[in-house]
Amino acid sequence: MSDREQLFFALLRSAVTEGEQPSCALPSKESLLSLFALAKSQDLAHLIGGSLEKCGILPDGQIRERFSKEQMLALYRYRRMEYEYGRICTLFEEEGIDYIPLKGAVLRALYPEPWMRTSCDIDLLIKEEQIDSAIALLKGKLNCKTDGKRTFHDVHVHTESGVHLELHYNLKEDLEPMDGVLLKVWDYALPDQERPHRYLQSPEYLVFHQIAHAAYHFIKGGCGVRPLLDLWLLQKKTCYDQEKLWALLKQAELTLFAEKLFLLMEVWFEGKKHSSLTEEMEEYILGAGVYGTVENAVAMGQSTEGGRVRYLLSRIFMPYKDLKERYPVLKKHPLLFPFISVFRWFKILFFKKELALRTVQSSGKLSKERIQRINTLKEELGLL
């Protein structure tokens, strides 16, 4: 871990731990610019800026302005989302729509101030049999809009003010055996005492879902630092039954991944020493930013499919079992499979051409050594 990364994680811990300040010398301008770039890539610049101010090592001038801007943006995003979240929840309560708040809507309570936990959208889970009613209510009473499409686990909704809502009707990630446990979320839902139609995930299931979601993004190109920060705060501030948590992880075959994730959290936030595996994980996560990279996703895909050609063919000729998850209409009408396949190709050519080109280019540039490293990493994390 470089000096920049050490400072980054020390400041991050300071930001979310009230009263704790890292002891560090005044960084140079170049060091602060590099630190800002890292923090910005992880959508954590607002936390790092606040921690630098708390430590009294944020100089006046352009660098302070950059960090301050990120703090103001984080606060603005939170205010917009909180307003819309309140409107949506009130509507669901009035109309009898059962729902479970997910991700940032729940996790921001773990931070010293709720705005400190940024999010790009609102995530709510409702029951699949209520999805059509919920969408109609959002459109009719809150003037929300949708693109009319439904993925294998959610519908994308946009409020009048432009806030993005991911309205989930299940928590599937299109990965077995993880999905078998994620589909049981309502079995682990607890009624909220304040609102009759709001439910909360049990503490054990909340931690499990955080780990499962991190595993999904890790496989798809990178999970970012924030999920681990959330998980660390959950571990420190939430009372949950360890045996119940590990039973859920065992069912999902995520015990090894969870063990290594906890080890990396100890390195980042508790000052433990790196192992070769945690160093590899750190390099993979920090280099991928918040949403991962195409290069990482392709490397993961090639290591799974057994080479470049097989990987590209699997992307072009998506098998029925995968395509039906992306286009649920196939579950009722499997004979549409060839037509949906052609539709998907045209959609990629006209709307995702740049991503497709980057995928092909990245596939051709990956070395055998890179693929082998990724395959070894997956094996050591139990993500095969």
Image: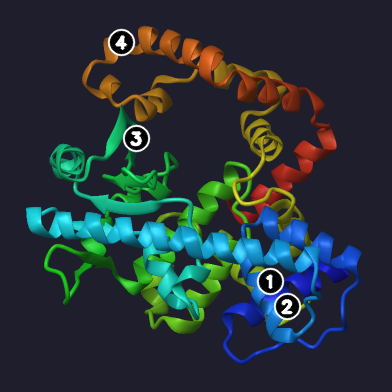
The residue that mark 2 highlights is 52
Label 3 secondary element: loop
The residue that mark 4 highlights is 336
Residue 379 x, y percent position in the rendering: 65, 50
Which of the pair 126/73 is nearer the observer?
73
Residue 341 x, y percent position in the rendering: 43, 12
Work out which quarter of the rendered image holds the N terminus and state it. bottom right
Circle 4 residues within 10 Å: few <14, some 14–19, many ≥20: few
1 and 3 marks in contact (CB < 8 Å)? no
As measured in the structure, the alpha-carbon distance from the residue carrying label 2 to the one carrying label 3 is 42 Å
Q: Which residue type carries mark 1?
A: Gly
Tell me if residue 64 comes above or below residue 310 in the rendering: below
Work out which quarter of the rendered image holds the C terminus and state it. top right
4 and 2 marks in contact (CB < 8 Å)? no
Q: Which residue type carries mark 2?
A: Leu
Residue 343 x, y percent position in the rendering: 42, 11
Q: Which residue type carries mark 4?
A: Leu
Badge 1 or badge 3: first in the primary sequence: 1
Circle 3 residues within 10 Å: few <14, some 14–19, many ≥20: some
Label 4 secondary element: helix
The residue that mark 1 highlights is 49
Residue lying farthest front? 61
Q: Residue at x 59, y 66 (%)?
A: 71
1 and 2 marks in contact (CB < 8 Å)? yes
